[in-house]
Amino acid sequence: MRSLSTHVLDTVTGKPAAGLRVVLLRDGAVLGEGVTDADGRFRAFPPLVAGSYVLTFHAGDYLRATGHALAEPPFLDIVPIHFGAGDAGHYHVPLLLSPFAFSTYRGS
């Protein structure tokens, strides 16, 4: 079985990005969604099967709600991370976020 989690950090404030909406898609269908907790984490995704996924982060809504100054339209609005799940195990997709940049990697 494969599982998925994410952790989002606001690199402007240096704090977890609490309340950021995340949506997991496969072949365009929503498999799971929710908002990050006070620690910037979301773990309530359904189990994964082998295949390709898109994890979308609703960055623009979060950045507006937390008072970050944004261009209109925002440079980052919805951030899609495309990833593949092959081997059994856990997939962790962290996101480092600011109004003008993001970074991700396969975490543990």
Image (cartoon, rainbow, N blue to C red):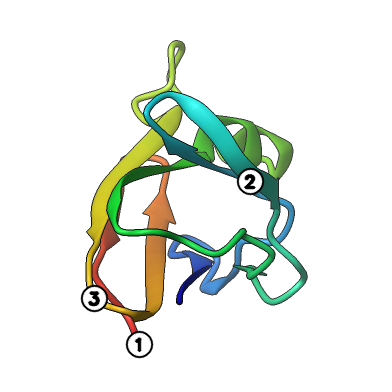
Judging depth in this view, the residue of 89 and 54 nearest the camera is 89
Quick one: label 3 or label 2, which is nearer the N terminus? 2
Judging depth in this view, the residue of 12 and 51 nearest the camera is 51
Which residue is labeled 1 in the image? 108
Q: Relative to 22, does residue 4 appear above or below in the rendering?
A: below
Which type of secondary structure does the marked residue at label 3 adopt?
loop
Q: Nearer the viewer, mark 1 or mark 3?
A: 3
Which residue is labeled 3 in the image? 87
Q: What residue type is labelled 1?
A: Ser
Quick one: label 1 or label 3, which is nearer the N terminus? 3
Q: Which amino acid does label 3 sit on?
A: Asp
Q: Nearer the viewer, mark 2 or mark 1?
A: 2
Left or right: 12 with respect to 65?
Answer: left
Identify the residue shown where x is 68% and y is 60%.
Answer: 36
| Marks 1/3: CA–CA distance | 14 Å
Which residue is labeled 2 in the image? 32
Identify the residue shown where x is 23% and y is 55%.
Answer: 84
Q: Relative to 78, does residue 63 appear above or below in the rendering?
A: below
Quick one: label 2 or label 1, which is nearer the N terminus? 2
Crowding around mark 2 (Cα neighbors within 10 Å: few <14, some 14 to 19, many 20+) is some
Crowding around mark 1 (Cα neighbors within 10 Å: few <14, some 14 to 19, many 20+) is few
Identify the residue shown where x is 67% and y is 40%.
Answer: 67
Judging depth in this view, the residue of 88 and 98 nearest the camera is 88
Residue 85 picture location, percent across and down: 28, 62
> Is any part of residue 77 visible from this angle?
yes
Q: What residue type is labelled 2?
A: Gly
Crowding around mark 3 (Cα neighbors within 10 Å: few <14, some 14 to 19, many 20+) is few
Tell me the quadrant of the picture where the N terminus can be found: bottom left
Identify the residue shown where x is 38% and y is 37%.
Answer: 79
The reply to whether callout 2 and callout 1 are in contact (CB within 8 Å) is no
Q: Relative to 7, does residue 10 appear above or below in the rendering?
A: above
